[in-house]
Image: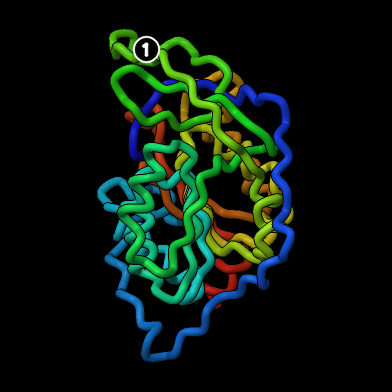
Amino acid sequence: MKHRLFLSLPLLCAALSIEAKSKKPKKTRRPTATTSQSQQSTPPPLTKQPNALVVDMISMDTESVLACLQKYLPTNPIVVEAESYDGKDTKKMAALWPYGQIYAFEPVPENFINLEKNTLDSANIKRFPLALSNQNGMADFFSSAHITTPKTQDDTPQEPLIPDHGVIFNTVLSVPTITLDTWAQQNNIETVDLLWLDMQGYELNLIKSSPNILKTVTVIYTEVEFVKAYKEQYQYKDVKEFLENQGFILVAKDFGELPIYWFGNAVFVRKEVLTKEKK
């Protein structure tokens, strides 16, 4: 969670078709790492929650969470991060998987400038000034007066969760949007190993809109909400139910049975990967 805003769900403007490039790029495949090059750090000891199958991430920083995901992923994973904000998490993933490929999405111009500046020295990061969405076109982002980072695509905010937080939505940005399936097709991306999603309640909209790429995904790290902060917003139970029906299992989370905050983060791993790990 990078910045918390009270925003609503997407108000999509007239569809803007995103044309494929006239010259098709080469198929994207994982770079090859030698055995000596692909050594990875040992994940920290894990603390189990009362449910023995679910790891407690409450006290973990980003590096520790990423280290725990290593056992489920190849040494050269293809990662999609949305949204990337200033690139701090992006850099950590690029450093952990130097032979992988990180695709970072950040639609807010001010943030994208910082993302570029902070990640230019990482050859395995590619940046896109787009909002991953459930439609191709344009969307309005609502920004607050005292936090300058709009995040979720939205129509109108719900009533504030904290009545006296003082957030005023006085700025609207129109940003280009694209589905994950469309982007993958245009860039000849055949597989995504890890989805790293921090979209403030819009994650499931994105996931549902891209069934082709979803079939290839092994691990999903996603923000989840426990109360409706935005109109027509999915909540944790919706995300969990949908991903379980798609063959994923909850393996880690940073909240308890009675969450303290109105949002949290959860990790889902494809069932067959967990089955192989047990053998």
Residue bearing the label numbered 1: 168
Name the side, left or right, on which 39 lies relative to 209.
Answer: left
Q: In which quadrant of the rendered view does residue 44 lie?
A: bottom left
The quarter of the image holding the C terminus is bottom right
Q: In which quadrant of the rendered view does residue 151 lie?
A: top left
Q: Residue lying farthest front? A: 22
For the question of whether residue 240 can be seen, the reply is no
Name the side, left or right, on which 179 lies relative to 88.
Answer: right
Q: Nearer the viewer, residue 193 or 72?
A: 193
Please name the residue shown 42% across and 29% down the image: 150
Q: Residues within 10 Å of mark 1 (few under 14, many from 20)?
A: some
Dot 1 amino acid type: Ile
* Position in image of residue 196 (x %, y %): 48, 52
* Position in image of residue 91 (x %, y %): 34, 59
Please name the residue shown 37% across and 19% down the image: 144
* Position in image of residue 155 (x %, y %): 58, 18
SS assignment at label 1? loop
Name the side, left or right, on which 120 lies relative to 208.
Answer: left
Please name the residue shown 33% across and 17% down the image: 145
Please name the residue shown 36% across and 39% down the image: 1
Figure check: 65 above or below 278: above
